[in-house]
Image: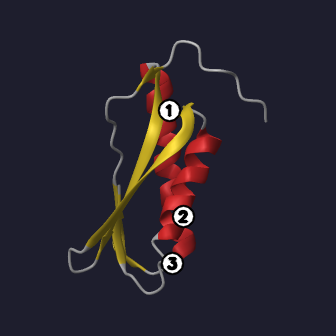
Amino acid sequence: MLHRPLESAQPARFHNRHMRFARHTLDCAAARAALLDLVVRLGLLLRWCGQAARALTVRLTFAGNGSWEKTRRLAEPSVHDDDLRALAYQVMDAAGLQRGRLTGLT
């Protein structure tokens, strides 16, 4: 896939996308699918606003109200789903989920 350069995209101020699981989940594939959905919706919002992401924060919420949050910067501002997805998956993989019962993603 060929990425077009960003000509007029402004850095995004702050956009947040959140989802809660109907049930606590241990299924990493379901969590990654939910994260992909959030990233795609975020990319659409950024493109609609004419903005670009410079960094991405992933927050995992666990049963018992615990949470884990990590932020990573993109190499350059982007609105491309592939860039956002790859970074989101890197951040989620850094969490080292094994037996954490997820209740939500932001």
Residue 32 lies, with reference to residue 24, above or below; the image says above
* Residue in the picture at 52% in, 12% down: 8
Q: Residues within 10 Å of mark 3 (few under 14, many from 20)?
A: some
Q: Is residue 18 left or right of residue 29?
A: left
Give 19 or 22, whichever is nearer the viewer.
19
**In terms of sequence position, does the residue under pointer 2 or pointer 3 come before the other?**
3
- Which residue matches tag 3? 27
Decide: marks 2, 3 in contact (CB < 8 A)?
Answer: no
Q: Is residue 66 left or right of residue 76?
A: left
- On the image, the x and y values in percent for residue 43 come to 51, 36
Give 66 or 27, whichever is nearer the viewer.
66
**In terms of sequence position, does the residue under pointer 3 or pointer 1 come before the other?**
3
Task: State the quadrant of the N terminus.
Answer: top right
* Residue in the picture at 52% in, 54% down: 88
- Which residue matches tag 1? 44
Residue 9 lies, with reference to residue 105, above or below; the image says above
- Spot the residue most to the bottom: 99
Q: CA distance from mark 2 to mark 3?
A: 9 Å
Does the rendering let one see residue 31? no
- Which residue matches tag 2? 32
- On the image, the x and y values in percent for residue 10 come to 44, 19
Does the rendering let one see residue 104? yes
